[in-house]
Image (cartoon, rainbow, N blue to C red):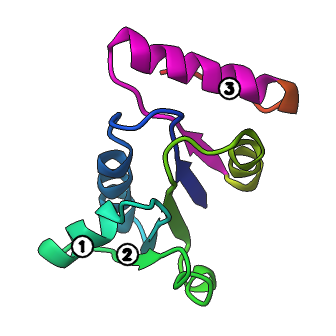
Amino acid sequence: MIIAITALKGGVGKTTTAVHLAAYLQQKDQTLLIDADRNRSALIWAREEKLPFYVASQAGSTALIRKYPHIVVDTRAMPELDEFRDLAEGSDLLIIPTTPNHLDLDATLKAADQLAPSRLTTKFC
């Protein structure tokens, strides 16, 4: 299963969501977290703490993907529209974290609107 974590706005907890989701999935089976964000926050986190799953850069993940039943991708913030749709279509699940302030919620609703033409099923929770 490939789960992508993305957002149209920075500072909404994307990396934190990815790391905690990967930790949960690791309890079920082997999990790979791919850090595709420019900040490399997940890789830094993995260097500072012993995480129960493997973290790889986007460039270093190609050879590893087939070895892991669970893959969590911490994407870059604010992807271009085409990249955003590719993420949605290429993932089994796309998670868009948000915070309860109006700017973050507005960005999340815009993200959902951008997915509407692709006929993907969207759910809010």
Q: Where does label 1 land, which residue?
A: 46
Q: CA distance from mark 2 to mark 3?
A: 28 Å
Packing grade of label 3 (10 A; few <14, some 14-19, many >=20) is: few
Task: Work out whether residue 124 can be spotted.
Answer: no
Residue 95, given in percent of the width and then of the height, sits at 52, 39
Q: In the image, what residue type sits under mark 1?
A: Ala
Dominant SS in magenta: helix
Q: Which residues are magenta?
A: 92-116
Decide if residue 60 is in sight here. yes
Mark 1 and mark 2 in contact? Answer it, CB < 8 Å.
Answer: yes
User: Residue at image x 38%, y 53%?
Assistant: 18
Alpha carbons under labels 3 and 1: distance apart: 31 Å
Q: Foreground: 123 or 7? A: 7
Give the left or right position of residue 80, taking residue 45 as reference: right
Question: In terms of depth relative to the viewer, which is nearer, 88 or 78?
Answer: 78
Mark number displayed over residue 55: 2
**Magenta-drawn stretch contains 97:** yes
Residue 33 vs residue 50: left or right? right
Amino acid at dot 3: Thr
Task: Please tell me which of labels 1 and 2 falls first in the chain.
Answer: 1
Residue under label 3, please give it. 122
Q: Secondary structure at mark 2?
A: strand
**Under tag 1, what secondary structure?**
helix
Q: Residue at x 47, y 21 (%)?
A: 125
The residue type indicated by label 2 comes to Val
Q: Is residue 42 left or right of residue 59?
A: left
Compared with 46, 76 (above or below) is above
